[in-house]
Image (spheres, coloured by chain):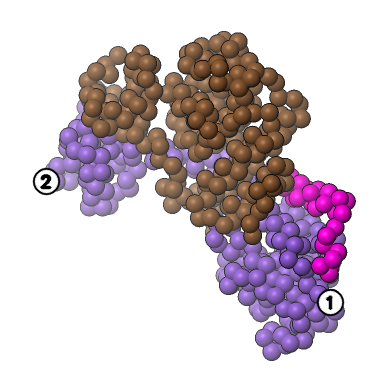
Amino acid sequence: MTEPESGAESLPGLVSAVLAALRDSNDTLLQPMVRVCRACVALLPVDGASISIIMDTGHQQSLYASDAVAERLETVQFSLGEGPCFEAFDTGQPVLVPDLAHDAALAWPVFASEIDKAEVGAIFALPLRRGAARVGAIDMYRREPGWLSETELATALQIADIATSALLAAAVTSTDDEIDEAWLTMLPGNRAVVHQATGIVIAEFGIPAEQALARLRGYAFATNRLLDEVADDLVSTRLHPGVIDT
Amino acid sequence: MSEQSESGGATRERELLLAFVDIADTLVDDYDVIEVLHRLADYCVSLLGASGASLLLSNQQGGLHVMASSPDHASPLEVQTDQGPSLDAYRTGQLVQIDDLTAAATRWPEFATAALAEGFHTVQAVPLQLRGQIIGALNLFGRETGLGQRNLRVARALADTATIGILQERAIRRGEVLTEQLQRALNSRVIIEQAKGVLSHAAGIPMDQAFQHLRTYCRSHNRRISDVADAIVRGQLAPGVITDAHAPREDRPRSTF
């Protein structure tokens, strides 16, 4: 059954669109996440949204971003290892930044300095959680500063719940209750290069992984580049890891 | 239940929406899965005009169990664990539509007899699918005619909602365990990539070649890739052991940190 496109303009519409996507495709995650991000933009006063899986180790795997600005917000947060989505994940609570220029400067000064205020006025980050268990976060942004109303926040939380349901349902095999290893290999691999680059730094200096990642982040920041770019240079041997010795 | 009654008014649209929200709410809250399935069967009768509805889910042995039905006494549904439209829908993944059950007496003798005894003359069996896998079927019975295309679509969408709810119920019950599993599985993916980086840099070889060495080593030593990758990243296993084809088979500790 093909769901009408207009279906995503209501919460029940989103639910059935996500369900149809889960039912019909074997590439189970992308379409449901596209639906969720579109619903954010359609139902809430935001201009873009992105969804990512976040790991306890501070790693982040982007699943979908609705536009280039939303994608950059994720990339910058991962590059620095700080920002609203990490805080939403860490605390399990929504993180509402209605006026980025003022609020973010206090909580995440480096992140705030990296974001173009002409493009992003407000950020709302919601954890993807089930009880105390957390799997990731949704980041939403709007160009102009402004609050979410109480009703809008409730809608946003419901969208986050639907996204969490879709994520868990996609990750669990239908036959038993275990995480489907084959499903994991279908996740987008856009951070693999960062992990490989971390390995290169581990081998160069004989340091633990967390320290290697921290050095990479520090080097990227000091050279005014993104972590992804530095990692790419290392893996393609354009850059020798010996320079990352801070 | 005829096509013209499907056009519906604003009231019916609102009722449908509420039905979706009601069942979709189960995605959020803790709930009783049987109760949800009963509600679904009730909606098929009260909103969509079916004369009877039953929901069947597969068991481990490949048969079907009746999980819920409306009205409750819809007994012909019970015998379907051996034969019947829902089993056919379950096995083929296709909608099974019978407009005249008297003609189905040879196909499903017991089922057709029991259904006709209840006054049902039509049946539509909708497969419940998730990720290409069929986990059960929804039966819709009619006294005269079956559901039209539009209501059948709504029935299927409601059934999909219930389907995910069933999986979700397990996920909710085991939410923390599953999340830990997911975290662990994701972490081992990260660690394998890191190990590739270590091997690649230490041996001066491309990433894909590093991964081949890793796989070969794990196969010949009968070890899990994630375990070996972890040992490499922690510096407990020297890269040369993996990338040097003539390396001795025992793991040599590395004392860099």
Q: Residue at x 37, y 20 (%)?
A: A225
Chain letter of mark 2 equals B
Q: Is residue B254 left or right of residue A18?
A: left
Query: Residue visible at 54% across and 60% down?
Result: B132
Q: Amino acid at mark 1?
A: Glu
Label 1 or label 2, whichever comes before in sequence order: 1
Give me the residue at 76% from left, 50% from top. B20
**Secondary structure under badge 1?**
loop
Chain A image colour: brown
- Chain ID of residue with mark 1: B
Of residues B209 and A206, which is closer to you in this image? Answer: B209
Q: Residues within 10 Å of mark 1 (few under 14, many from 20)?
A: some
Q: For this view, does A95 lie left or right of residue B105?
A: left
Q: Which residues are magenta?
A: B1-29
State yes or no: residue A14 in magenta. no
Task: Check the rendered structure and report the hue given to chain B.
Answer: purple
| Residue that badge 1 annotates | B144
| Secondary structure type for disc 2 | loop
Residue sticking out furthest to the bottom: B106
Name the residue at the left extreme.
Answer: B246
Residue B50, how many percent across, how many down? 81, 67
What's the CA distance linking mark 1 and mark 2? Answer: 78 Å
